[in-house]
Image (cartoon, grey):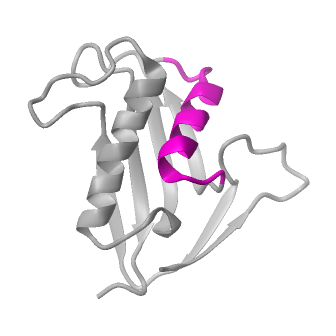
């Protein structure tokens, strides 16, 4: 597990579903490309359902983390691209369900007008600190 410190200074507004700062003592960094709600057969999981698409994208992120021997605790940055950025409560709840924790890295939610495949509502990319991994 990597050394990660999460900070939300009390002088900055509360951070619902994320921390303002993530400090990582890293030797190596992995960048996991944006993951979406696509099944292995390229079908969309949860058409029209933001919560289900968020869970599916997070499951794909988790598969990528597993492939490099990392865990959710190694994630130091998360960027979310979504057609519905104001639905952050729905997004946060679905993320917490998959990661099994209410502890979040530094995060940005970006509102977009579309994603690579019509019908996708969300895409999630993460940065991972791999300082203790070979």
Asked if residue 3 lies in the magenta stretch, the reply is no
56 and 34: which is toward the camera: 56
Residue 5 visible: yes
Q: Which picture quadrant has residue 93?
A: top right
Residue depicted at 70% across the width and 54% down the height: 20
Residue depicted at 82% across the width and 44% down the height: 14
Q: Main secondary structure of the magenta part?
A: helix
Q: Is residue 67 left or right of residue 107?
A: left
Q: Quadrant of the C terminus?
A: bottom left
Q: Which picture quadrant has residue 16?
A: top right
The residue stretch that appears in magenta: 84-102
Q: Is residue 45 above or below residue 92?
A: above
Q: Is residue 126 above or below residue 110?
A: below
Q: Is residue 80 left or right of residue 133?
A: right
Residue depicted at 51% across the width and 18% down the height: 84
Q: Position of residue 23 (x, y in %)?
A: 61, 72
Q: Position of residue 33 (x, y in %)?
A: 28, 49
Residue depicted at 55% across the width and 75% down the height: 24
104 and 28: which is toward the camera: 104
Q: Is residue 127 above or below residue 95?
A: below
Q: Is residue 84 above or below residue 15?
A: above
């Amino acid at each position: 597990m990597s050394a990660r410190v999460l900070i939300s200074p009390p002088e900055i507004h509360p951070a619902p579903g994320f921390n303002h700062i993530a400090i990582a003592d890293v030797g190596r960094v992995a960048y996991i490309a944006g993951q979406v709600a696509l099944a292995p057969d390229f079908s969309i999981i949860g058409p029209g359902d933001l919560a289900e698409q968020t869970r599916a994208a997070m499951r794909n992120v988790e598969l990528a983390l597993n492939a490099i021997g990392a865990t959710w605790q190694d994630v130091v940055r998360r960027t979310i691209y979504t057609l519905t950025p104001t639905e952050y409560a729905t997004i946060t709840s679905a993320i917490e369900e998959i990661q099994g924790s209410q502890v979040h890295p530094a995060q940005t939610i970006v509102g977009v007008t579309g994603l690579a495949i019509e019908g996708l509502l969300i895409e999630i990319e993460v940065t991972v600190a791999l300082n203790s991994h070979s």
